[in-house]
Amino acid sequence: MEPSRTPASAGSRSARFPGPVPSGPPLPQGGSPGSGGPAGLPPAHSTIICVALPGLAISTAQGQLTGKGLEGFYRAGRRVLSRCQVRVAGRDPLAVQARATAADRARFVAVVRVSPGPSPDPDVIVERSRHADGTERITLRSAAPRPLRLPVEVALGSDLADLGAIASGRAGPELSASVHDSGLRWSGASGGASVTADPPPSDALASAGLLRWEFELPPGGTAGLELRVRLDGAAPVRAAGRASTSPLASARATGDHPALQSLLDTSIDDLRSLLLRDPAHPADTHLAAGVPWRCGLAPADALAAARMALPLGTGLAAGTLRTLARTQHRGKTGTLEARSGMIPGPRRDAGAHLPAGCTGTEATLLFPALLAEAFRWGLSRQETEDLLPTAERCLGWLRATVGEGTYLRDPQPGGPARCETQAHAHRAAVLGADLLDAFDRPGGAALRQWARGLRTAFQRDFWIEDRGGGRPAAARAPDGHLMSYLGATAVHLLDSGLLGGGELAPGLLDSVQTEQLARLLGGPAMDSGWGLRGLGAKEAGYNPFGHRTGAVRVHETAVAVAGLAAAGYEKEAGSLLRGLLAASETYGHRLPEMFAGEQRSEGSAPMPHPAACRPAATAAAAGVLLLSALAGVRPDAPAGTVTLRPMRSVPLGEIGLTGLRIAGAPFSVRVSRLGLAMVEEAAEGLQLGS
């Protein structure tokens, strides 16, 4: 985190692996998301993205890779192959279907008519199976009544462009090719790349970038070829999420609602596709923020997603915490260096009402909270104790930064005290104190005392009374001026965190204020019918496509559902849950990080945001949080208990969750249509709490 730095241009926001990346889409100078062309970000919403980091394959529904926009195969943020166009018998196949078959692969089907005669029926089917690891299988299938001799050409091109350059319209021309092995090779200042073919082509023309074959197909016969795309010096892609050591359990969901299983399957598949290893410590995995724009480590997003994914096991949390612990600023003992104890993070745009915020603040406060909750879910005592010094330094940074004051303000001089920052700070203090007590470490009492003072002051200083019943302020200036607009960041006031014994930590609001916030979040100004708007529809500056000023952000909607359900406001929680689930069905259950906040109406569909990452770590993990919130699973593995607080209103009917993890062992629970929860599988000795 560098407080004086302003948001960077796309040229410095390239997707690199696995280093930290800015917490938002890269905006070219003078451009706006989704405007297209050199002055704007290439749209991503109409693409099919295959992910197995550090590999990507980005395509349109046509299947042909033309080198336009984002199309191509990528490795570690570099476009290895920008063009791959197939012609059969001198014709471009007509695309008829395109779909993702998993997070890391897609299938494209096209047809060609090669037989003479007046019939409109195609007689050759061209199927392309494209994988994020850099392989493409092309299969030709004949439906002609006579044998066919089919000439096939594949036109290839590479610009070896960095994703940041592509985003800002500076990709440059294609490089000259040379014949290499059984394919082609390209070389540039940044290295080289190659494509090899099996079977080898009968002809290779480097000057035209062409590979040629001639296949003979009997009636009903098939023929195929495979292309392998490689970056020089890079080993074949071995995605961390596909390894047997993946930290995410293969949980299953069943029940009355037909989308339950698909949502959980897709969420887990997307999370696995976004996993990266720390190169210096390959046993530690963490999540990239999202593709195509944020393919590296964004600390706050990685921690938030790992926290929501705790029902799938503590391995991801442990790897994320260890990775980020190695980045923590450490000042000399006894010094007053302002950043000592902080987890660094880039700035995040906060919309027109507030200056960009520092995600390092959020990450530093999330670290002890995630460690405390991971311990409750079953992270071993030894692993927790090894990470405890880092958490203590985070908490020390919090207390030192607040000093004699009450609120945690933005780090720049004159910075505001944000509503959500106080919620994160309060949760860190309360959960951190619980963790310190569990390990007989000092400091818990002082943290609780500060948290109590913050609660008292917040309820007085951050609440704006009005004729509608009042609302929490979005931020408080150093002079006491309150920013009164209502945005989705207020949902973090409902996310207090898990303590021992299955108890939830106290929140910053009192019961009357909590009820009023629930009413506001469930009202038409915030609930779009598809999820929670980032800014109320009646607020100044509302823009349904504004990524902080009106778009539905999936992460915050899921936090709202879980928080409202835990506080007993199931009507509002159920409405947001059903809306988001309906939206997920229109996206094939792969939710983007955000979409437009337009009001839902009969026969409508949520409108995509052209700059949204999809998949995104927090959106994928949100699917896990939504389903676990239905069952209200609250474990305390150290005490050997688990408490169940299901949503009594059963907004999706009966639901069963199998293959979750508590204390490292499988855990399964079922919630009946009457709202009664039953444990069906659990670790030996795990008792049901009251």
Image (tube, helix red, strand yellow):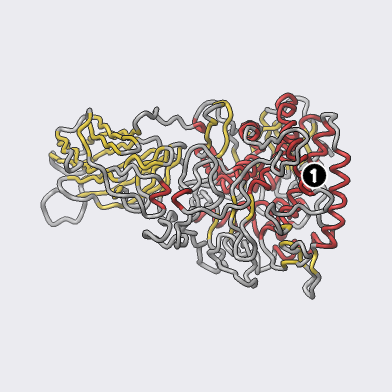
**Would you identify the image quadrant in which residue 643 lies?**
top right
Q: Residue furthest bottom?
A: 467
In front of the other: 210 or 685: 210
Q: Residue furthest front?
A: 335
Q: Residue at x 74, y 47 (%)?
A: 646
Residue 151 located left or right of residue 11: left
Residue 567, image x, y percentages: 78, 53
Residue 213, image x, y percentages: 17, 36
Residue 359 located left or right of residue 517: left
Quickly name the residue at label 1: 399
**Would you identify the image quadrant in which residue 314 lies?**
top right
Residue 181 located left or right of residue 62: left
Above or below — where is 446 with respect to 171? above
Residue type marked 1: Arg
Q: Disc count in the image?
A: 1
Residue 181, image x, y percentages: 22, 28
* Residue 334 visible in this rendered orientation of the protein: yes
In front of the other: 77 or 520: 77
Label 1, secondary structure: give it.
Answer: helix
Q: Residue at x 76, y 63 (%)?
A: 472
In front of the other: 422 or 64: 422
* Residue 265 visible in this rendered orientation of the protein: no
**Would you identify the image quadrant in which residue 415 lies?**
bottom right
Q: Residue at x 25, y 30 (%)?
A: 198
Q: Residue at x 66, y 36 (%)?
A: 328
